Image (spheres, helix red, strand yellow):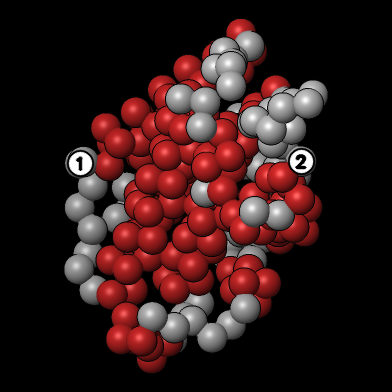
């Protein structure tokens, strides 16, 4: 199996994504969070989404692309769960999640509830789910989206086109920035929310992974 090198375009996207992740991690250290479950638990989920985003960037940098793509769904789900637990869940639902690791509403129901709140009413979460959910599942569970990218000519080996790599890099880094902005908002750090917003090229509303 031949180790492939990334194109210049992908290398540039990786450099930008790495810079965004470094900025996020640097600024996370100065944030103080309330200790109650409605703030702390969502913040932990947003932080997990950021780590998945970081993992995606580093795995693609190391040319371990299939594993990177498998994390896209995890990053997205962590963000949605965090947003729902903070903005929509009752105290009882939060405690049930903590005690029994259980959230009853389906993902689309979580998204519908979250998008009733300001900041989410652009429907970017439901747009992502509508356009990319099938692909996310395929990458995570070894479906056709993954299998189709493991044949290069007559050889069974990874074969990820630049367009897909660029899309996942932008998606993962932007979702990490949005998750960071949610943490900053939970801590009433509007200065950091504005800085994160300024770093975003645009929320990944039409991502198709």
Secondary structure beneath label 1: loop
* Residue at image point 72% right, 45% down: 147
Q: Tell me if 28 is positioned left or right of 171 in this view.
A: left
Residue 172 visible somewhere in the drawing: no
Instruction: Name the residue at 30% across, 36% down.
Output: 25
Label ID, residue 30: 1
Q: In which image quadrant can residue 149 be found? A: top right
In the rendered image, which quarter is residue 195 located in? top left
Q: Residue at point 41% right, 37% down? A: 54
Q: How many numbered dots are placed on residues in this image?
A: 2
Q: Viewer-proximal residue, 179 or 101?
A: 101
Q: Residue at x 50, y 77 (%)?
A: 88
Residue placed furthest toward the bottom: 92
Q: Tag 2's secondary structure?
A: loop
How many residues crowd mark 1 within 10 Å: few (<14), some (14–19), many (20+)? few
Q: Report the quarter where the C terminus lies.
A: top right
94 displayed left or right of 197: left
CA–CA distance in space, label 1 to label 2: 43 Å
Q: Mark 1 vs mark 2: give the one in front.
A: 2
Figure check: 91 above or below 18: below
Disc 2 crowd rating (10 Å Cα; few below 14, some 14-19, many 20+) is few
Residue named by callout 2: 148
The residue lying toward the viewer, choosing from 20 and 169, is 169
Q: x, y (%) of residue 18?
A: 43, 25
């Amino acid at each position: 199996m031949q180790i492939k090198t990334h194109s210049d375009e992908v290398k540039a996207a990786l450099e930008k994504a790495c810079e965004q992740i470094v900025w996020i991690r640097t600024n996370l250290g100065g944030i103080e969070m309330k200790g109650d479950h409605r703030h702390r638990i969502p913040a932990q989920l947003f932080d997990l989404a950021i780590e998945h985003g970081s993992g995606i960037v580093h795995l693609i940098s190391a040319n371990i692309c299939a594993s990177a793509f498998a994390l896209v769904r995890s990053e997205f789900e962590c963000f949605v769960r965090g947003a729902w637990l903070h903005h929509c869940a009752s105290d009882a639902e939060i405690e049930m999640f903590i005690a029994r690791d259980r959230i009853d509403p389906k993902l689309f129901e979580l998204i519908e509830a979250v998008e009733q709140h300001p900041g989410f009413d652009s429907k970017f979460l439901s747009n992502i789910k509508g356009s990319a959910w099938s692909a996310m599942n395929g990458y995570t569970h070894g479906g056709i989206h993954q299998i189709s990218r493991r044949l290069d000519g007559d050889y069974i080996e990874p074969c990820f086109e630049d367009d897909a790599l660029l899309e996942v890099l932008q998606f993962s880094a932007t979702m990490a920035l949005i998750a960071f902005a949610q943490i900053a908002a939970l801590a009433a750090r509007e200065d950091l929310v504005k800085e994160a917003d300024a770093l975003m090229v645009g929320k990944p509303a039409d991502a198709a992974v």
